[in-house]
Image: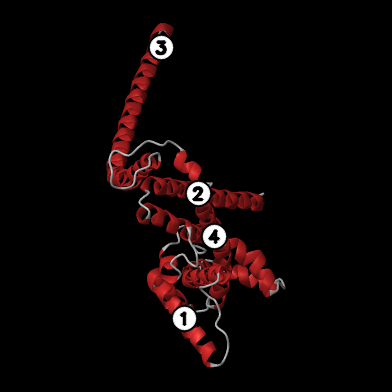
Amino acid sequence: MSPSSDSSLHTSEESEAGLLGSASAVRRSALRRRKSLGEIVMIAPALVLVSVLILGPIFVAFGFSLTDWNGFTMPPNWVGLENYGRIFTDERIVSAAILTALITVVGTIACNVIGLSVALLLNRPTRINSLGRTLVFYPFVVGPIIIGFLWSAILGSNGAINATLVAVGLDKLPFTSDPSWATASLIGVIVWSTFGINVVLYLAALQTIPEPLLEAAKIDGASPFQTFWNVTLPLLAPAVTVNVILVAIGFLRTYELVLSFTSGGPAGATETVVFSILSTSFARAQLGFGAAQSFVLLVMIIAVTLVITRLRRKSEEAVSA
């Protein structure tokens, strides 16, 4: 066979290989397109629901926040960013924001510390611990409205505790009539009704910790505190992040318990942001102003979530480094 014929044979084989490769690439591309189309079809209902039920109302609320709409007259008057300026100058709203921040910070720390401590005590599967888990989680199942009425009957001016104090010749305690006492009482009731979910989540996380690691720490002579600090707590880090985010967001949205426990009193001392939003929007017929407060609260919730997640990632990077 001559060199020219051999060269033409190689050229023909390369051409066939190129055609086969091109055909294979076309088939792969078609498969990817069909797969992508199938994924789009599968998630389309969820996207529609999110757009209609979540994103749509958010954009509508933002539009109303730029007006002075009172909920009745249409069309509303355009006021631009005036409502947002009022948020930071209205003393009542600033007071509600400070209280909400206090509830969120103190409540989140308390719920996680108490929740983790109780979870460690109830970690072993015994009958007493099973009963304890049920009792601890029960307040979280009961609605916040009922919790508020219950504690109002206990801590109110004529509640069970004050009635007992009067019966034994002591003075009443201003659990709900003094601003400082009312704030402390509100935070205590919120923590009491919430930390049960933290206990459950921490118990679930504790079950995933490998027993050999704990045994190895004991063999190495680590004390119970050292074992907890150096083995258990680092492995619980993802659960801590979830608990902090869930509780913080829940406390930022506190409303029902405030309504049934203190009704925002005394003199507005226990009004939270959401309580202020709803009273402004409906009781005072200022839905435009209330929408502006709602949008600011939404931004704050997103910011808190991002900050907590970012701090958690930084701590993970520091540990891995």
Residue 203 seen in render: no
Q: What residue does disc 3 label?
A: 6
Compare marks 2 and 3 and give the one earlier in the sequence: 3
Residue 48 is at least partly visible in this image: yes
Mark 4 belongs to which amino acid?
Answer: Leu
- Residue shown at 53% from the left, 73% from the top: 119
Q: Amino acid at mark 1?
A: Ile
Disc 2 designates what residue? 300
Q: Mark 1 and 2 residues: CB-CB less than 8 Å, in contact?
A: no
Pointer 1 residue: 154
Say few, some or many: other residues with alpha carbon within 10 Å of mark 1 (under 14 / 14 to 19 / 20 or more): some
Q: Position of residue 46 (x, y in %)?
A: 30, 47
Question: In the structure shown, which secondary structural element does the residue marked by tag 3 occupy?
Answer: helix
Q: Quadrant of residue 52?
A: top left
Q: Secondary structure at mark 1?
A: helix
Spot occupied by residue 106 in the image (x, y as percentages of width and height): 58, 64
Query: How many marks are shown on the rendered structure?
Result: 4
Residue 99, label in figure:
4
Badge 4 or badge 2: first in the primary sequence? 4
**Mark 4, mark 2: which one is toward the viewer?**
4
Instruction: State left or right for residue 155 relative to residue 74.
Output: right
Which residue sits at x=32%, y=37%? 36
Residue at the spot x=49%, y=47% of the render? 87
User: What whole-number distance in Å separates the C-alpha atoms at marks 1 and 2?
Assistant: 34 Å
Mark 1 or 3, nearer chain start = 3
